[in-house]
Amino acid sequence: MIPSGELQLIFHYRAPFKEITRHNHNLIQPQCSICGQQTGYKDIITSDSVGMMAAVFYPYALSAFFHSSMSEFTNQSISLDDVFPTKTRELQARMTETTSPYSRIGLIENFLLGRLSIPYDFSVAREATTLLSSTSRNLTVKEVACKLNISKRQLERVFLKNVGISPKKFSHIVRFNAAIKRFKNAESLTMLTYEAGYFDSSHLIRDFKEFTGLSPKKFFKYPCQIENK
């Protein structure tokens, strides 16, 4: 599992997955969990009995359903039961009982709609992530702050609260994923570097080692690739 810039709610209705972090720490995922921003890689191991649904959110969107700062969830899988014990246990029981995927989707939707509350700085977070996600424009954090008529420090606070990581770290993750998606059509590693928004190949290699533990050359030997969206 590698950083994507997105946040997730994971709902296991059978055996949960096992995680092995880059530091070789082992843990079993909670039955229902909040998965914050990931800034490193980890291995996911499944059992023979797998049943899972995930709600994947835009980088800023999970803040509309939880009052906590998203930075509290970064690099963690937090049990939803620790946040909403009664509601989570009820949801978990009903997810396990039903056999219909559409029923499970409906249960998750109802759970989320009951939590919906748009924060005051939601639109700023949304616009900032949109600007930083545009690799063609390749804007700096300072330039994004200027476009939004706020200070760089204000932008950093908005990001930590609504996205969970700094805008600089988010822009690194965006470029890293852009490189993966553009790999198939790139003529060379040098061309890939510039098409993904990097200044030089050393920055590309640094991000790949940080986010995957591998060099780009070793990473792209693996058959599993992120498809273009």
Image (cartoon, rainbow, N blue to C red):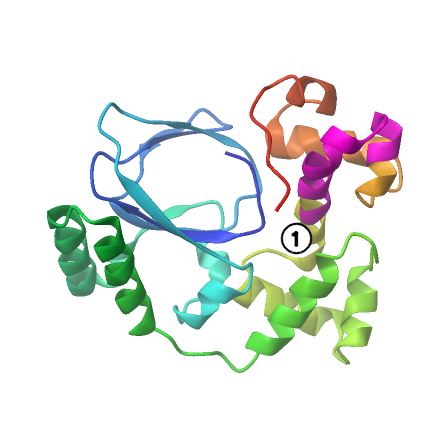
Q: Which range is magenta?
A: 174-192
- Identified at 62% across, 34% down, the residue is 211
Q: Quadrant of residue 214?
A: top right
Please name whichever residue, 40 or 198, is drawn nearer the observer in this view of the structure: 198
Q: Is residue 107 visible?
A: yes
- Identified at 74% across, 31% down, the residue is 183
- Which residue was labeled with disc 1? 170
Residue 181 magenta-highlighted: yes
Q: Amino acid at mark 1?
A: Phe
Q: Quadrant of residue 67?
A: bottom left
Please name whichever residue, 220 or 186, is drawn nearer the observer in this view of the structure: 186
Q: Position of residue 10 (x, y in %)?
A: 34, 48
- Identified at 68% across, 35% down, the residue is 180
- Identified at 11% across, 49% down, the residue is 97
Q: Residues within 10 Å of mark 1 (few under 14, many from 20)?
A: many
Q: Position of residue 203 (x, y in %)?
A: 81, 36
